[in-house]
Amino acid sequence: MELTLSRNLPGSRLSCGVLICRERNLSSMGEGPRAILNMTLFKKTTAGPVTIGGSNDGQLKLLASVSSTQPNLEQVYDGMKLYGVLNNGQATLRLELSKQADCLAEYICELQVVNAKGKQMLTSSRLVQHPDQGIFNAQDLSLTSSLLMRLTSVIEQMDVKLAVMDDRSLDLKKDLIDTRTNLEKTLQSTEDKLCQLDSKLSAIDSYAIQEKVLKEMKTQIDTQFDKVLASTERTDDILNKTAKLFTTLRSNNKKFQSNTMENYQSFFGNVTRSMVEMFTRNQNQTDRMKGNFISFKNDVDLSWARLQSNANESLFKTLTVLQNIISKFNSTLDSNMKYALTDFFMPEGCKKNTPALLHPVSFPYLAIFKSEFPLDTPILCDTTTEGGGWIVIQRRSTGTVDFNRDWASYREGFGTLDNDFWLGNEKIHIITSSGVYELRVELKYQGESKFALYDRFALADEDKNYTITVGSYSGTAGDSLTYHNGHPFNTFDRDNDSGSGNCAEKYTGAWWYANIADCGYSDLNGKWGDSGWKGLNWNSLTGNNSVTFSEMKIRRVIG
């Protein structure tokens, strides 16, 4: 147990000293663990001996005490500030003394503890002072007063300097905030300029790709055109030989006329007329082929010139124009040349891992005009996503096509391949009936692209109301289609859902709805941009909000 007194200099405005009694560690007292019952501090008031334990009460004055029942103390008593605490096996009493007489008095601190066996023990510590050590002479007091005055002056000067430093600190902080704001604006401006520069570079790269691809196309077209001209020249040669043969036959006919019977002359006359008609038809067909080839080459040259004059021309649209020209030209080509050119520009079928000729990766869609399916319209083929081979059956990207349509429209299909469209339920049924297909649904919501993949997909025929079949789900968009598995297709004029109402009328769309009480968890044919379950919703991704892009496509797995 410690009992100490720390004196302040005479003339202090706060106190003359601080008296502390402290017990820090009971383990040093031996005999096992102990607990503090109380700590008490006394002041000696009269001369004479003092008995430990305070038996001579007339000579001691109780100042402060802490115990297990009163572990905290904080009060002012007789000009002294008293503090005390008893906690975690430690006890402390602290007195701030303001009177010089108190700083020269004697003090006794008693500590009462109890061991593990219940035996109580009392220890004490006494602080005895010598008055001559605490007396300062007049010279010392004068010196101390002078030092205090100088110290006060220095402190006041420091206060002024600190105030100035605080003002400068505030100004500096404000300047730093302004500088940071300016830097953030500069960085934002720089980022905007970098984005603009990146866009320009991307446009340059895109145009360079387009120009390179179209140059290769033009070279190949010129080569094919030369082959066609060579073929027509060979045809002219054959026709010339036919004409010579015809002349020879006519000459022989004249020789035989005088020596043959009348019926032979009639027969040969018929053969002669047939030969003239065949020659005339061949000559006209050859002339038409030449004219069509020249017109075809002029159309290609014109498309090439337009693309060179406009760097933003869409390569996809250019390819589509060329494909339309070839499609119209098919009827005028002979069978061998026709199949050579159509196979060159328009690959047959949309299959996985089959690269499309003259088709860059940066433009993933290709119009297929000739496929293995008995369809009267072209199909759109995604050639790049996960190996390609995806037939697109639905796309919503611009909102310019109305999807709130009747049963006949959804059966036959509507829209255009270069915009929003629905391929048609009957066509989808024909395609999925030819083998085993998978379905991929690609969505964009709040700027992020997600997808849902189903390992099986099929539509029944119209007699079964184009009922949908889907398999197991995987992907990042969440599963919002399995709930509709096994349900028929529904439009506002063909109510095939269960219940008394019509989900298509309620949500202004067309889908494989379940029932009027719970129409389902998705509808990508709803109203563009609408909410409240009436838009293009995919519940697991959007809730009752609408996506900003949707595309449904199928690919053959088996068959």
Image (cartoon, rainbow, N blue to C red):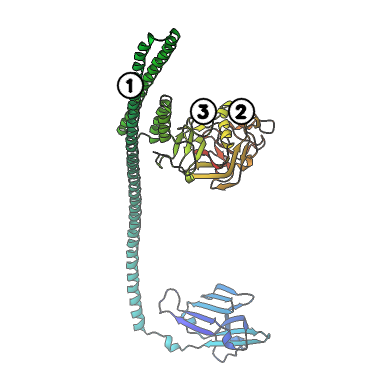
Mark 1 lies on a secondary structure that is helix
Q: Amino acid at mark 2?
A: Phe
Q: Nearer the viewer, mark 1 or mark 3?
A: 1
Mark 3 lies on a secondary structure that is loop
Mark 2 lies on a secondary structure that is loop
Q: Which residue is mark 3?
A: 376
On the question of residue 141 being in view, the answer is: yes
Above or below — where is 210 with respect to 406?
below
CA gap between label 1 and label 3 equals: 40 Å
Q: Which residue is mark 1?
A: 240
Above or below — where is 126 with respect to 313?
below
CA gap between label 1 and label 2 equals: 66 Å
Q: Amino acid at mark 1?
A: Asn
Q: Nearer the viewer, mark 2 or mark 3?
A: 3
Q: Position of residue 83 (x, y in %)?
A: 54, 75
Q: Are marks 2 and 3 in contact (CB under 8 Å)?
A: no
Q: Amino acid at mark 3?
A: Asp
Q: Pick whichever of labels 1 and 3 is earlier in the sequence.
A: 1
Would residue 502 be found to the left or right of residue 156 on screen? right
Name the residue rendered at 57%, 75% in the picture: 85
| Number of the label disc, if any, that sits on residue 492 | 2
Q: Position of residue 443 (x, y in %)?
A: 51, 41
